[in-house]
């Protein structure tokens, strides 16, 4: 049996020849990636390429179909659930349904790796709740019913819960979905602060290419069951790479603006553009 490769110094999360999928059917294989302290790593690629499945497997919500996920050098399946939750915090796109819980109650759930699910929060836990909600600008919603919020407000509250967990690595699936432009920019600024100033590792997916280019330190391109390219924004956001990744007509992607030209005859006929 092949031995697990040596741990890469400085990497919080690594994958080695990881294969992911459902019910034994491999969707993406040969996945080799690392998330280091202070680094924002973003998966990009067309819908259905398997980006969310990769995140769920790295987070331990799906079993790997091959290879392994390493958490600071240790196989993820060997790390106890509570210890894992102190290392990795996850915010996926799955809907959260609650009954009669306030936003502060939701964020406080992020403290369970330290208090236990039935443990009473300490003053320190309450301080962490307020700190996280302040960072995401949702403290004024603390007494509101979570289910009565808009989608964008819920998104920010759920990210506050993930931050409140005090992980080393944040895993986020489309964190800017349901947010208007202002809050998209604010949220990504928070993520850069958490990575670059507080040393977290961040692994996420984004559909909005201009946002991915702006926030990411490293990008992983996923297409047709494999990783086609990894690199810096300067290496990935070039017309030849983006056109191939999304099967665009050559020259459709404008590296200067981050826009994708609409096909001729689409829109108002005056050079309309759309973001990929």
Image (tube, grey):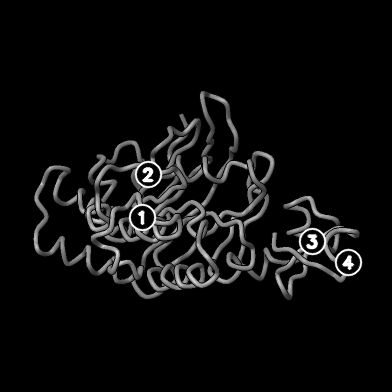
Find residue 96 and name its label: 2
Left or right of residue 256, residue 220 in this image: left
Q: Is residue 187 above or below residue 90?
A: below
Q: Earlier in the sequence, mark 1 or mark 2?
A: 2
Could you give the CA–CA distance between mark 3 and mark 2, rounded to whole angstroms? 39 Å
Q: Earlier in the sequence, mark 3 or mark 2?
A: 2
Left or right of residue 238, residue 44 in this image: left
**Tag nearer the camera, 3 or 1:** 1
Residue 7 screen position, x and y as percent: 40, 51
Residue at image position (70%, 59%) is 276
Q: Which residue is mark 1?
A: 158
Q: Earlier in the sequence, mark 4 or mark 1?
A: 1
Whether residue 72 appears in this view of the structure is no
Could you give the CA–CA distance between mark 4 and mark 3, rounded to whole angstroms? 25 Å
Question: In this orientation, which residue lies closer to the viewer: 115 or 78?
Answer: 115
Q: Which residue is mark 4?
A: 269
Find residue 240 and name its label: 3
Task: Determine whether the residue tagged by mark 3 lies in a helix, strand or loop.
Answer: helix
Residue at image position (44%, 43%) is 94
Residue 209 screen position, x and y as percent: 64, 63
| Dot 3 alpha-carbon crowd within 10 angstroms: few under 14, some 14 to 19, many 20 or more | some
Question: In this orientation, which residue lies closer to the viewer: 48 or 176?
Answer: 176
């Amino acid at each position: 049996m092949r031995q697990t490769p040596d741990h890469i110094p400085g990497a919080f999360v690594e994958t080695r020849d990881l294969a992911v999928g459902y019910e034994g059917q491999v969707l993406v294989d040969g996945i080799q990636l690392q998330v280091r302290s202070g680094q924002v790593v973003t998966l990009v690629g067309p819908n259905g390429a398997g980006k969310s499945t990769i995140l769920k497997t790295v987070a331990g919500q799906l079993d790997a179909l091959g290879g392994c996920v390493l958490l600071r050098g240790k196989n993820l399946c060997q790390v106890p659930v509570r210890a894992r939750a102190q290392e990795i915090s996850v915010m996926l796109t799955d809907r959260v349904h609650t009954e009669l819980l306030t936003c502060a109650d939701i964020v406080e759930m992020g403290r369970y790796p330290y208090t236990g699910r039935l443990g009473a929060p300490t003053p320190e836990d309450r301080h962490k709740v307020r700190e996280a909600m302040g960072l995401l600008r949702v403290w004024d919603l603390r007494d509101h019913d979570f289910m009565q919020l808009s989608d964008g407000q819920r998104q920010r509250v759920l990210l506050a819960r993930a931050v409140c967990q005090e992980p080393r690595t944040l895993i986020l699936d489309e964190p800017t979905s349901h947010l208007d432009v202002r809050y998209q920019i604010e949220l990504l600024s928070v993520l850069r602060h958490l990575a670059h100033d507080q040393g977290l590792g961040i692994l996420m997916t984004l559909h909005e290419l201009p946002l991915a280019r702006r926030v990411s330190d490293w990008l992983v391109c996923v297409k047709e069951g494999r990783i086609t390219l990894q690199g810096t924004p300067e290496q990935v956001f070039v017309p030849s790479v983006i056109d191939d990744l999304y099967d665009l007509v050559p020259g459709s992607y404008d590296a200067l603006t981050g826009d994708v030209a609409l096909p001729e005859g689409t829109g108002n006929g005056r050079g309309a553009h759309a973001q990929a």
